[in-house]
Image (spheres, rainbow, N blue to C red):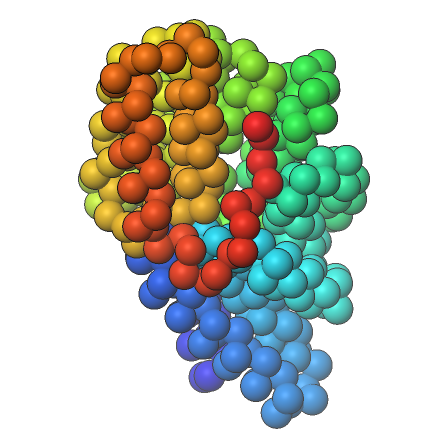
Amino acid sequence: MTLDQLDDDVVALARDYNCTSPIEVYRRAKELLDTAQSMLERTQVPRQRTRGYLAAGQSAALLSAIAFDLGSLPTAVSLSRTAALYGQVIEHGPLQAYAHGALAFLAYWGGRPSEAVRLVHTAQQFGGLGDTARTRLSVIEGRAYGHLGNPAAAERAVRNALEQQTGARDELHDDIGGEFGFPDDRVAMSNATTYLLLRNSEGAEAAAQSALRLLGSRPEDQRPLLISTQASVDLARARLLRGELDGAHAALGPVFEVPTVWRGAGTLERLAAVRSGLCHPAFAGAAEASTLGERIEEYSAAATAHRLGAATPLAIES
């Protein structure tokens, strides 16, 4: 009965992730991981231990994701490694692939894109993966190649992400879904960032607009605010690359309305890139650029993403 409840709670948290405040997700995920680890200490029944390891691995993966959103890269890395280890113990391909994909994501955020590519290629070799898992890994691969400045490999990965249509499914990415899923709007948002790394403003703008259009088609209470906010910032960055200050300002309108608790690390790093772009000589003396830059600084200073105490901004593209 306790294992059944634990399974239900993990599924519920994964599916509620994007509509639950980050601090609450962190609290609930930590409780689930503690519960699963406690259960593993109390049973030697093989089938129960397998379920316990799976629940612990899923909980650690969710906790890693929210630790990143709250600004603690080292904590996120440690928890993804824990999830990968639990997946290895029970030989669960989708969990291992998810965890290695997360480690790849965290590697390029930590300034190690070559390691990110290696981790993605490891993740792609695990068995039992469905289309969603492979789409997610291709998106992460594209971002890693973008950081490496390899446009041909990055664009090939983007195409692969858009062409996964075999109908294959797996129990983690598809059946549970939620934070473990990777819907079209998230694919488009992530691909926008890849195009920005390649300095492709048109590709980035098209992908960001696609993400926002897909998100806008959802019921309002089902729109993941972290994803839509990042897409809006990437839209602003794409326009800023072309020197369109007014367009960038307009794209940031919805971002400035986001409550402090929803201002995740991914959003703050993207905004830091906007702030840097506003210092370009092309905008020298522009009062709007100065005002927008100050507003970004105030917005970022109030963000809850600093709650876990990241000592320095996370590394991403300059």
Q: Is residue 153 left or right of residue 305?
A: right
Query: Is 25 located above or below residue 256 in the figure?
Result: below
* Quadrant of the image containing the C terminus: top right
At 36% from the left edge and 63% from the top edge, which residue is drawn? 23
Name the one closer to the observer, 300 or 134: 300
The image shows residue 165 at horizontal and vertical percentages of: 57, 27
Direction from residue 113 to residue 281 in the image, left or right: left
Query: Dividing the image into 4 quarters, which one contains the N terminus?
Result: bottom left
- The part of the image, by quadrant, that contains residue 267 is top left
Place of residue 213 in the rendered image (x, y in percent of width and height, measured from the top left)? 31, 23
Residue 29 vs 140, above or below: the answer is: below
Residue 245: x and y, percent?
Answer: 32, 13
Can residue 128 be seen here?
no
Residue furthest to the front? 285
Q: Nearer the viewer, residue 92 or 147?
A: 147
Question: Residue at 53% of width from left, 20% of height from top?
Answer: 196
Nearest the viewer among 83 and 290 is 290
Please tell me how many numbered marks the rendered image carries: 0
Task: Determine which quarter of the picture holds residue 277.
Answer: top left
Can residue 221 be seen by looking at this rendering?
A: yes
Q: Residue at x 58, y 71 (%)?
A: 56
| Residue shown at the point (63%, 83%) measured from the top left | 40
Q: Is residue 190 left or right of residue 245?
A: right
Task: Give the side of residue 103 with respect to residue 296, left or right.
Answer: right
Measuring from the top left, give residue 306's x and y in whole percent: 42, 55
Pick out the residue farthest to the bottom: 42
In this view, the residue in front, 151 or 133, is 151
